[in-house]
Image (cartoon, rainbow, N blue to C red):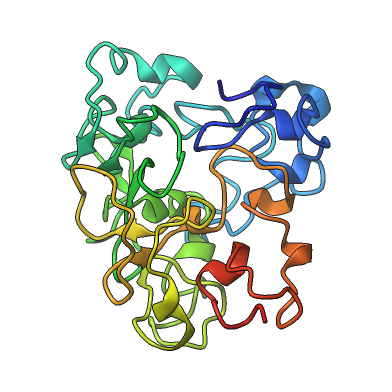
Amino acid sequence: QVMHSDPSGDLAAGNFGYITGIKGTAANSHGHNVIALGAEFKETLITNLPGGIRQSFHDGYIVNASNLTCAGLNGCHGYRYASGSPTDVVALKGAHHNNVDGQLAVADTAANSYRFLVGVRGYENQTDKWQNASATSHNEYYGATTPMTLGCGATSCHGSNGVSPPNHTISGFCGTCHGNFHTLSAGASDGIGPDITSPFIRHPNDIVLPASKEYQNYTTYSVQAPIGRTAVPASASSVVTPGADVVTCLSCHMAHASPYPDMLRWDYSQMNAHQSGDVNTGCFTCHTTKDN
């Protein structure tokens, strides 16, 4: 379930219960505050999208705290901002009956896209359904070696299926709303910076995990900090290959909600550089030499 109090664990995308308090401590900062949760959980401190798209005809015109839904016009799943796009779950019509799972390398309908996120490619775990259970049993996220650049030309997010990521990655999908967090600099959007070379303005994604320095030590898949693949695999792999595999939004964040602020996969307040011991968890899964 996407919202529950079961102490045994959560699905891969997290648990909306961390927002409402039926699990953990209630906090709006723990996840996406979809309006189905009720008026008492409506976000009030941030009324518009964090990292929203800075581009003509986008500021203030898209999703906000008053209209965020699970699916449809102002949601994530199903057809978004398509011609006559319905609101919420109606936008998923036909997707469940025509569902394709496992390796999803086409992603041109809701039914054959990763988790009904139109346009997103990936692999859906067939061993432990809907879960990231272990290094050998998990979803596989599709990524790229260079983030998108915002624009309404060749990289436009608008097409016959409504809004979807032109690069088909999970990070590109997040960028269709949180564009200034996830893209290269363009116009008013500073994104991660002008290129894929450090230093960055913001933590990059859709970028290769370097095969040098501290990053080369991340070689066994961690479900706490999952990486992405540049080709959609047919099964889950426990091997991480620095220099080939990539960082995604979901390497650090949950999709629905988590027990921690900013939807992070771990408690950032406990990520104390050179004071945590050799733990290789959280931020230190990739930044392997900064923990001790």
Viewer-side residue, 55 vs 53: 53
Q: Residue at x 33, y 35 (%)?
A: 125
Q: Quadrant of residue 107?
A: top left
Q: Residue at x 35, y 46 (%)?
A: 136
Please determine whether, in this image, residue 19 is positioned above or below residue 39: below
Viewer-side residue, 260 vs 120: 260
Q: Position of residue 12 (x, y in %)?
A: 49, 37
Which quarter of the rendered picture does the N terminus lie within? top right
Q: Residue at x 20, y 48 (%)?
A: 233
Q: Position of residue 230 (x, y in %)?
A: 24, 60
Viewer-side residue, 279 vs 192: 279
Which quarter of the rendered picture does the C terminus lie within? bottom right
74 with respect to 20 (left or right): left
Q: Is residue 107 visible?
A: no
289 with respect to 220 (left or right): right
Q: Residue at x 36, y 32 (%)?
A: 115
Please determine whether, in this image, residue 277 is positioned above or below residue 15: below
94 with respect to 270 (left or right): left
Q: Position of residue 134 (x, y in %)?
A: 44, 44
Q: As drawn, which residue projects farthest toward the front? A: 278
99 with respect to 139 (left or right): left
Q: Is residue 40 visible?
A: yes
